[in-house]
Amino acid sequence: MNDDTRVVEIAGAGPAGLAAAITLAHAGRPVIVHEARSEVGYRFQRDLQGLENWTGARDALDSLRELGIMPECKWIPCRQGTAFDAWGQPYGIHSHEPLFYMVERGSGPDTLDTALLRQATGLGVEVRFDSRLRRVQGPGIFATGPKAADAIAVGYHFDTSMGDGFWVICDDNIAPRGYAYLLVMGGRGTVKSCMFSGFKQEAVYVKRTVEAFQRLVGLEMIDTRAHGGIGNFRVPATARSGRHAVAGEQAGFQDTLWGFGIRAALVSGVLAACSLLEDSDYDRLWRQALGEVMATATVNRALYELLGNRGYRWLLRWQQRQPDARALLHRCYRPSRLKRLLVPLARRRLHSQRKDESCNHVNCSCVWCQHGGEPHT
Ligand SMILES: Cc1cc2nc3c(=O)[nH]c(=O)nc-3n(C[C@H](O)[C@H](O)[C@H](O)COP(=O)(O)OP(=O)(O)OC[C@H]3O[C@@H](n4cnc5c(N)ncnc54)[C@H](O)[C@@H]3O)c2cc1C
């Protein structure tokens, strides 16, 4: 631990920025978090999301608690769900341990963001809202969320009388190269098409997503609100901007296969703070903790994109025969000699796909084209 007592300024009160602030405050460092919006989690508007529990061998919540992050929010452990192929055939998803923890995002009383904010301010962190940080003179961390759209998730939030649960559809006609999903927790739901291509046609895919879930599981939506957002992922060459560490999605830290970024955001925030406290090499820290899993996820994505609807069907059938979905996914995210060999190829392939030719930017109001404007969702 170094004996620097200067105030650390953090840009962004998302999971990455608040995890960094909590870690610094635990060590007694004064911290100011600047948040551009008037509240935490503004871009999520009470979205339901999953804190994934498969990339690490240990339980995600236990690992976070060990790092000093206490997500004391409302969550449900998700062990059982249903996936559908493009022909409407259902496949059970079963896991002994939670596959993910469903959480709410945004500024409500029970959300993950509010829980992190509560922990940070309880430790003496000052959070300044409506404060967009553009430059940091002294010690600082940038955690400002995505800066490009590699994928978009678009659909609706709603109230419902449906029971808690999760449902997924793998069908390129509904969510190109991605998946459509439905999450329900405590009488509230989110239904989205998470697409990795075809952004220009987002309205068509959202319509098909809703119709498919109505047909397959009797989706019931009351008081429907449109919602969408972007996802940014890459394994960066460095996660530093000048002298400052960059954490969370701003650095590209996110699961490239399916777009789960909360866990990587929290972990990278903690590591960014540790590197500042210990004067250690942040790039070395995140590479050790996240590098291999992210590289493997990049290969997983490149392979997934080759599958198409028949391939997804094969994958779903195969997973249904496995005894435990979490163990299976954990294995898929472990590096192997073959996957290490495929990393450069996968990176090249995904890099070339960033420029989605299906969107020509003419008179376009899609989530992807709008993301560059301030404020983005
Ligand atoms: C629709 C959707 C669904 C998702 N579902 C899941 C899921 O199920 N599971 C999962 O793990 N991940 C999911 N993700 C991804 C996940 O939400 C993000 O990866 C995660 O929130 C990233 O955290 P972060 O702290 O890096 O950035 P953010 O959560 O985006 O926080 C960044 C903060 O910085 C603020 N900010 C920006 N610029 C400045 C500035 N200059 N100064 C001050 N503040 C600034 C922003 O207002 C924002 O509050 C989803 C994303 C979307 C869009």
Image (cartoon, grey):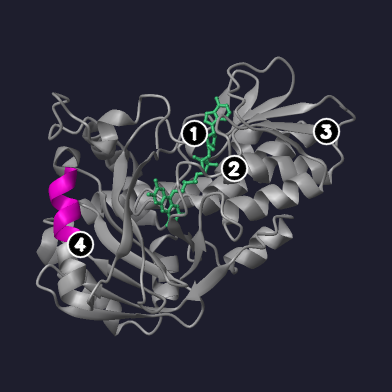
In primary-sequence order, the first of circles 4 and 2 is 2
In primary-sequence order, the first of circles 3 and 2 is 2
| 9 versus 156 height, above or below | above
Asked whether residue 288 is in view, the answer is no
Query: Badges 3 and 4: C-beta atoms under 8 Å apart?
Result: no
Which residues are the magenta region? 202-209
Query: Image point 48% across, 39% down: which residue?
Result: 249
Measure the C-alpha gap from mark 4 to mark 2. 32 Å
Rendered location of residue 369, percent (x, y): 26, 29
Closer to the eye: label 4 or 1: 4
Closer to the eye: label 3 or 4: 4
Dot 2: within a 10 Å radius of its alpha carbon, few (fewer than 14), some, or many (20 or more) residues?
many
As shown in the figure, which amino acid type bears the numbered disc 4? Val
Rendered location of residue 268, percent (x, y): 60, 43
Instruction: Mark 1 and ligand 1: say if the CB distance to the nearest ligand atom is below 8 Å.
Output: yes
Q: Secondary structure at mark 1?
A: helix
Q: Main secondary structure of the magenta part?
A: helix
On residue 64, the disc is none
On residue 16, the disc is 2
Relative to residue 257, is residue 177 drawn left or right?
Answer: left
Residue 204 forms part of the magenta stretch: yes
Instruction: Mark 2 and ligand 1: say if the CB distance to the nearest ligand atom is below 8 Å.
Output: yes
Query: Badges 3 and 2: C-beta atoms under 8 Å apart?
Result: no
Q: Which residue is mark 1?
A: 250
Closer to the eye: label 1 or 3: 3
